[in-house]
Image (cartoon, grey):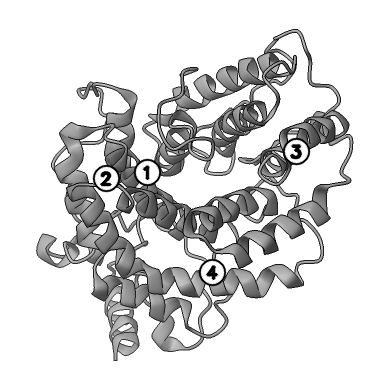
């Protein structure tokens, strides 16, 4: 019935000379409110707004996009006519921020800042936004989508990794005390059935993966493996931890001379080399890792310089693919700091790693509050991951920022 109504609407619009877009503009605000929630404050890109600190701006960016349905890019297998639907009907929790994975890490960003008490003035608004989306009914819709035919590879591995980062965050908050712990536990309990499906899909995929995926974009395996491990360690899933560690060692233990000179590619937002290095510090002890890193990236300087790795350049921030390089600068920053954190305190490479991390992170942060939605819908999450030392420690800000 929904499909026939959509076809009828298209025919009527065509016959009357009106576009579907024009008809959409005529929808009542009440009807559109089913899918898009209005926020009480404007986007920080508005020059009239002066956020008190970066975290306020990042929270506002996420609040303004997690329920913003359009524009939207979906990776969606159509099994039949009933699968032709709006994003908010297909995946009722994670439909905003342009795509599913960005919606997921937009929710993670809010959860991270809220749980770390970094924007207390916005706590009530953030909690209300998360509570409105983390409902049993909406999560049931996500489950139904994931359980559909031909969807075991949906958002694998990037989006799945970010989902596990979200539940890791909730699990850490829930382990604390007070009202936030109680609320986080309730949200986590609702999300756990979806988490179980996602973990099952990952465990079904990993044994079949014969080779690492060394791309600088969503399909990269090293970045996802790192977040899988962080989730497994926090959730106590020894099976997942063992599976990912063994796969990481099998793929990368013998890697040598990673070609940093070939990076970045023109649309990278993850470094193929540095993300491997950030992964391997999770599966090796300090001395073993220091030795492995000498073979993997032998050109890391020992003089404390930051010029050995040039920041990525974005010539058009309105281009959704070219703006990936802003994200590369931020993900490089957290990888470099992760690498430094795993080396012995007297390792002379640490100073250059941290200097380059600061250079890349600060450059990346300069791009976050762009008025262009192609970048703003996701870059704040990358900045928050770096800024809050996510993946390295569970508290404290990034002193380099």
Q: Which mark is residue 366?
A: none
- Mark 2–mark 4 Cα distance, whole angstroms, equals 27 Å
Q: Which residue is mark 2?
A: 63
Count the numbered circles shown. Answer: 4
Which x, y percent locates residue 115? 30, 42
Q: Earlier in the sequence, mark 4 or mark 3?
A: 4
Q: Secondary structure at mark 1?
A: helix
Identify the residue under disc 1.
109
Q: CA distance from mark 4 to mark 3?
A: 26 Å
Q: Residues within 10 Å of mark 2 (few under 14, many from 20)?
A: many
Q: Secondary structure at mark 2?
A: helix
Q: Mark 4 — residue? A: 199
Left or right of residue 19: residue 219: right
Q: Mark 1, residues whose alpha carbon is within 10 Å: few (<14), some, or many (≥20)?
A: many
Residue 148, compared with residue 44, is above or below; it is below
Residue to which mark 3 is pinned = 273
- Between disc 2 and disc 4, whose residue precedes? 2
Residue located at (57% from left, 76% from top): 152
Instruction: Locate residue 72: give its quadrant.
Output: bottom left
Crowdedness near tag 4: few (<14), some (14–19) or many (≥20) residues, C-alpha within 10 Å: some
Choose the circle earlier in sequence order: 4 or 1.
Answer: 1
């Amino acid at each position: 019935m929904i499909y026939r109504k959509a076809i009828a609407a298209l025919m009527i619009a065509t016959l009357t000379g009106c576009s579907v877009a024009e008809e959409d503009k005529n929808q009542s605000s009440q009807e559109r409110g089913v899918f898009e929630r209005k926020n009480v404050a404007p986007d920080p890109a508005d020059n009239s707004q002066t956020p008190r600190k970066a975290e306020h701006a990042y929270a506002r960016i996420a609040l303004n996009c997690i329920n913003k349905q359009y524009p939207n890019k979906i990776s969606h297998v159509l099994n039949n006519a009933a699968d032709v639907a709006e994003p908010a009907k297909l995946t009722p929790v994670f439909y905003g921020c342009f795509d599913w994975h960005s919606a997921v890490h937009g929710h993670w960003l809010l959860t991270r800042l809220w749980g770390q008490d970094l924007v207390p003035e916005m706590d009530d608004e953030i909690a209300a936004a998360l509570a409105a989306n983390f409902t049993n009914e909406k999560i049931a819709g996500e489950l139904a989508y994931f359980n559909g035919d031909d969807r075991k590879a949906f958002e694998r591995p990037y989006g799945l990794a970010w989902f596990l980062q979200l539940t890791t965050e909730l699990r850490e908050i829930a382990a604390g005390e007070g009202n936030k712990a109680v609320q986080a536990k309730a949200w986590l309990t609702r999300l756990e059935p979806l988490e179980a499906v996602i973990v099952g899909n990952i465990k079904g995929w990993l044994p079949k993966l014969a080779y690492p995926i060394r791309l600088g974009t969503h399909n990269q395996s090293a970045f996802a493996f790192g977040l899988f491990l962080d989730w497994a360690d926090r959730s106590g899933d020894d099976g997942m931890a063992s599976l990912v560690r063994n796969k990481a060692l099998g793929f990368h233990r013998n890697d040598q001379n990673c070609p940093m000179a070939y990076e970045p590619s023109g649309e990278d937002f993850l470094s193929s080399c540095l993300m491997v290095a950030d992964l391997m510090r999770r599966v090796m002890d300090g001395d073993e890792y220091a030795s492995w890193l000498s073979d993997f990236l032998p050109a890391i300087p020992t003089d404390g310089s930051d010029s050995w790795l040039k920041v990525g350049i974005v010539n058009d921030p309105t281009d959704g693919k070219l703006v990936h390089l802003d994200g590369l600068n931020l993900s490089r920053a957290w990888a470099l700091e992760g690498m430094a954190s795993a080396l012995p305190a007297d390792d002379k490479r640490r100073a250059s790693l941290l200097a380059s991390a600061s250079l890349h992170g600060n450059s990346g942060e300069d791009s976050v509050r762009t008025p262009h939605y192609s970048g703003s819908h996701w870059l704040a999450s990358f900045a928050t991951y770096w800024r809050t030392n996510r993946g390295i420690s569970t508290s404290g800000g990034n002193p380099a920022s």
